Amino acid sequence: MASRYYQEMQESFRNNSKSREFPAHTAKVHSVAWSCDGRRLASGSFDKTASVFLLEKDRLVKENNYRGHGDSVDQLCWHPTNPDLFVTASGDKTIRIWDVRTTKCIATVNTKGENINICWSPDGQTIAFKFEVNEISWSNDNDMFFLTNGNGCINILSYPELKPIQSINAHPSNCICIKFDPTGKHFATGSADALVSLWNVEELVCVRCFSRLDWPVRTLSFSHDGKMLASASEDHFIDICEVETGEKLWEVQCDSPTFTVAWHPKRPLLAYACDDKDGKYDNNREAGTVKLFGLPNDS
């Protein structure tokens, strides 16, 4: 018997299953993220820039383009409580913090290597970046720091001491991504074995696995209520499941592999970005678009 939430969300997506794409960059988009208040969406691209959009009703309106990096912008994230600040990580060996009020870079950090990951602590006091592990995240309580690596392990450190607490063999192969749900009850990992694992934060045990994808899981995102999980890969769809049961709620069809997904912090609206069709730019389609799923069918 499907849960009431499952039935309500299926009904919601039946009426709001439209996806729309918005021009963002001149090359493919690597990362999308919502500001904490949900008013802005930022994207980072291979074209060395970041873009910020305002969400107006059911469309994205480009507000600004942020230039300064000398290489691809591989990941970005917003300050957890300040909706005006975001940070970008680039292959140019720098981290940059931007303020949307001035549209300027307010700080630059030079690093030893190319940065593929960046993460802001829940209290907003610390930014972590790393180039030797796959993905990094704090626990919602700010007292543990999680790293995933190529051996399929999740390494857990105390924070701020950064002393090893535990190492979990999460997957038999490369553990690519990790995300915490907004409620702090679960975290999920995605792996090269095409599996998504759901973990209980308190007990650090695997609750269930989802195996609907056929390719390495590149990106994950929990919905604002922690009840849905979106996962994507080189499969030409995004899987949306109900966390509590693991049941598939919806499938968002894509024309190409998906690099990044991000649920809106207040409503069932999913931002995502895909590779360019067939790896080539065609004249019929803007290179470097961001997309929104969950729009009204009649919009």
Image (cartoon, rainbow, N blue to C red):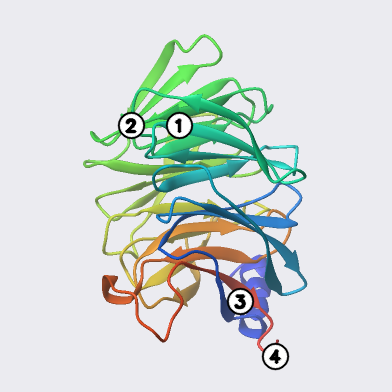
- Which mark's residue is nearer the viewer, 2 or 3? 2
Measured from the top left, where is residue 238 in percent x and y? 44, 68
Q: Can residue 277 be seen in this view?
A: yes
* Mark linked to residue 133: 2
Left or right placement of residue 259 versus residue 221 in this view? left
Measured from the top left, where is residue 74 in percent x and y? 42, 46
Task: Please tell me whether mark 3 sits on a helix, a strand or a loop.
Answer: helix
Q: Tell me if label 2 and label 3 are in contact, CB under 8 Å.
A: no
Image quadrant of residue 21?
bottom right
- Which mark's residue is nearer the viewer, 4 or 3? 4
| Residue drawn at x 26%, y 64% as measured from the top left | 214
Quarter placement of the N terminus: bottom right
Q: Give the CA separation, mark 2 to mark 1.
A: 17 Å
* Mark linked to residue 56: none
Does residue 64 sit above or below 143 in this rendering?
below
Task: Please tell me whether mark 1 sits on a helix, a strand or a loop.
Answer: strand
| Residue drawn at x 34%, y 54% as measured from the top left | 217
- Which mark's residue is nearer the viewer, 2 or 1? 1
Q: Tell me the crowding category of disc 4: few under 14, some 14 to 19, or many 20 or more residues within 10 angstroms, Cα based.
A: few
Instruction: Tell which residue pokes out farthest to the bottom in this image.
Output: 298
